[in-house]
Image (cartoon, rainbow, N blue to C red):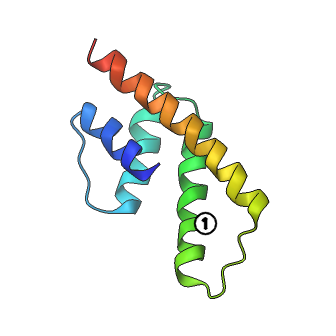
Amino acid sequence: MFYCAEAVLLEIDQEFSSHGEVQGAFGRELIKTGKLPAELHQYLLQAFRLRQEADYDAPSRIDKEAAVALLERARQFYAATLAFVETQNA
């Protein structure tokens, strides 16, 4: 989701170097302006938290159910951001 968020931000001439900057700009530039659905920002933030947990908490406590739910949100995120990019390039 992070790279999708970066790609969408690049479409509107916004480029950032950190996860926090991308997350903040995604909310500010795309969610608050109504260009993308609000739940996408929560998906992005939640995915980052789970990635942090999986990378740095040993052992990780992410169960299969949480992983499956995250995968479905990632698919929705990808579809919405791809549609946005396609409309920008139409």
Whether residue 39 is visible, yes or no, is yes
Residue 62 vs 13, above or below: the answer is below
For mark 1, what is the residue?
Answer: 50
Q: Amino acid at mark 1?
A: Leu
Q: How many marks?
A: 1
Note whether 38 is above or below 70 in the view shown: above
Name the residue at 58% across, 35% down: 76
Viewer-proximal residue, 74 or 38? Answer: 74
Q: Nearer the viewer, residue 64 or 24?
A: 64
* Residue extending farthest top: 90
Work out whether residue 32 can be spotted.
Answer: no
Kindly identify the residue that appears in the image at 71 percent across and 52 percent down.
68
Q: Is residue 6 left or right of residue 83?
A: left
Left or right, 26 with reference to 70: left
Q: In the displayed structure, would residue 47 be above or below residue 14?
A: below
Examine the image and state in which quarter residue 87 appears: top left
Q: Residue at x 39, y 36 (%)?
A: 29
Say which residue appears at 57% left-offset and 39% top-offset. Answer: 75
- Residue 11, quarter of the rendered image: top left
- Residue 40 spot, x, y in % from top left: 56, 39
Residue lying farthest bottom? 58
Of the 4 image quadrants, the one containing the C terminus is top left
Mark 1 residue crowding within 10 angstroms, few (<14) / some (14–19) / many (20+): some
Front residue (pair 45, 69): 69
Considering only vertical position in the picture, is 64 above or below 33?
Answer: below
Q: Position of residue 35 (x, y in %)?
A: 46, 25
As helix, strand or loop, the secondary structure at mark 1 comes to: helix
Q: Position of residue 51 (x, y in %)?
A: 54, 67
